Amino acid sequence: MTSSKTPALAARIERFPIAGSFTISRGAKTEAVTVVAELSQNGLLGRGECVPYPRYGETPEATLAAIEAMQAAVAGGLTRQALQAAMPPGAARNALDCALIDLEAKAAGQRAWNLLERPIPGERTTAYTISLGTPEAMAAATAKAAHRPLLKIKLGGDGDDARIAAVRKAAPESELIVDANESWTEANLERNLAACDAVGVTLVEQPLPAGKDDALARIKRPLMVCADESVHDRNSLAPLRNRYDAVNIKLDKTGGLTEALAMADAAQALGFEIMIGCMVATSLSMAPAMLVTPQARFVDLDGPLLLARDRDHALRYDESLVYPPDASLWG
């Protein structure tokens, strides 16, 4: 029997169907595969959810194994602070970090933002994602979402000038941000940036492949450019200052909320604008990320809106407004 002085750790893989399909430059998927970590102690349950990302060599099975491998450390009294050195940044550490915070908040009878001495998050407008497709398909999808104030448009390289023009025509009033997911090249970079600028796009996310983005420092950028795959945790920030104007903080990259909050502080100190982003996942993944929203210029936490069903006690979404989590979900 596990001592009440230390929590017991369990983890599992869960699957949630996507409404239709979700397509970016690297391919399409029809379900969100998440890994959940649960810490139980004295009748309390702390939970955290992560999304293993193949782009970084992660799989659900390996992520599950990495979490389960921490059972002895957890039983030995692993703290959230010690976790940062015990596991590398990534999805597995994210799930465990968020579960530790959730359990710690429940044990203290506090909300997570009070426990961590952060500002109380309020409701924020989240981006709503339009998947990559033909200009005609993207325009049709955009027309259905044109009432939303902030749209995130997935692009894919050649033909992006036609795609973004079609999207703008279908949503003349929405603020547009674009995510190229590393699909542009030095040959089409300036042309595609100009096409985005011409229709009033506010920001372009990760146009060039990570590690091959030096060209961004050599050109005059007509609009804000945001790093995603090029940035992971605090250690990756400084080299990006001449290439990017903003950084996309995702808990699955930072390895949890603990590092995400520290990274947000460091990014602001370096002059970056902040986007708080997500993978396609349930409200349990979005809930901890809400604590970063007070520092974010852009909020992209629409993962649950893309699912056919969310989990119980889900975040409240009022069209594009997302609200902080109830304690019954997390924190």
Image: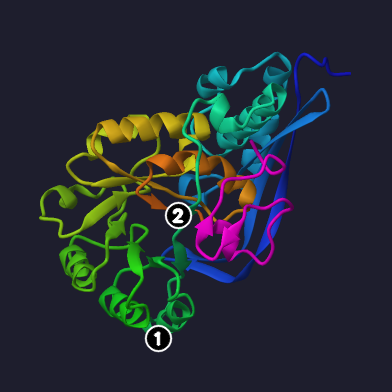
Closer to us: 44 or 190:
44
* Residue 72 pos. (x, y %): 72, 19
Q: Which residue is mark 2?
A: 300
* Amino acid type, mark 2: Asp
Q: Is residue 284 magenta?
A: no
Vertical relation: 26 (above or below) 64? below
Q: Which residue is mark 1?
A: 136
Closer to us: 310 or 291:
291
Vertical relation: 194 (above or below) 314? below
Q: Is 139 on the left or on the right of 157, as rendered?
A: right
Figure quadrant of residue 164: bottom left
* Residue 78 pos. (x, y %): 64, 17
Vertical relation: 246 (above or below) 48? below
Q: Are marks 2 and 1 in contact (CB under 8 Å)?
A: no
Q: Which residues are magenta?
A: 302-331
* Amino acid type, mark 1: Glu
